[in-house]
Image: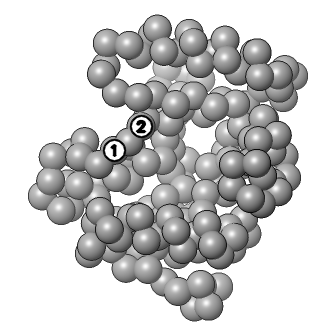
Amino acid sequence: MAGCLYQSLWNILSDRPVTENIKDYDVFYHDAVDTSYAAEDAIIRRGAALFADLGVEVEIRNQARVHLWYEARFGHPRAPLRSSEHGISSFLVTGTCVAIGSDGKGGYRTAAPYGLDEMFEGVLRANKLYAQRDLFEAKAESYVARWPWLQTVGWDDTA
């Protein structure tokens, strides 16, 4: 989900190797029954073994645990996420709120709560439902440093 999708697209649109500048590949799940670190760590370790031959970093996170560590890492409190889809819808930049996942029937589905247009157009708009200005601006600056053609919509211009 997220970075490996929109960053791959931005690389293609920039005539770059598809995996250039992709730090990691994120996998979300939501288990509100067991939000312990030990339970998440067991899933992370299983995933590490499963993905070891890929030669990339795969970051697995239980979205039901995000609120437990978010403030210590990012300096802002976070309300609990109700589902993986809720987590996807709460990314800092609306055009990066995208994921592909199983439909539970052997196929796949796309989650893009704000659509895909801004991702394809390279528009970086704050998701004001969830973003804090400092975090959004740092994220946008990081993206523009790697893909200079991206266009940031200023915080004050974002609805």
Which residue was labeled with disc 2?
24
The image position of residue 50, as x and y in percent, is: 45, 10
Other residues around mark 2 within 10 Å, as few (<14) / some (14–19) / many (≥20)? few
Would residue 127 be seen by someone viewing this image from the given angle?
no
Query: Left or right: where does residue 153 sit relative to residue 55?
Result: right
**Amino acid identity at mark 1:** Ile
Name the residue rendered at 18%, 62% in the picture.
Answer: 14
Which residue was labeled with disc 1?
22
- Quick one: SS at disc 1? loop
- Quick one: SS at disc 2? loop
Name the residue rendered at 87%, 22% in the picture.
Answer: 33
The image position of residue 96, as x and y in percent, is: 49, 58
Above or below — where is 97 with respect to 145? above
Name the residue rendered at 82%, 40% in the picture.
Answer: 68
Looking at the image, which is closer to me, 140 or 99?
140
Name the residue rendered at 52%, 15% in the picture.
Answer: 47
The image position of residue 2, as x and y in percent, is: 48, 47
- Kindly identify which numbered label has been placed on residue 47: none
CB of mark 2 within 8 Å of CB of mark 1? yes
The image position of residue 10, as x and y in percent, is: 28, 59
Above or below — where is 63 with respect to 95? above
Query: Left or right: where does residue 37 sit relative to residue 148?
Result: right
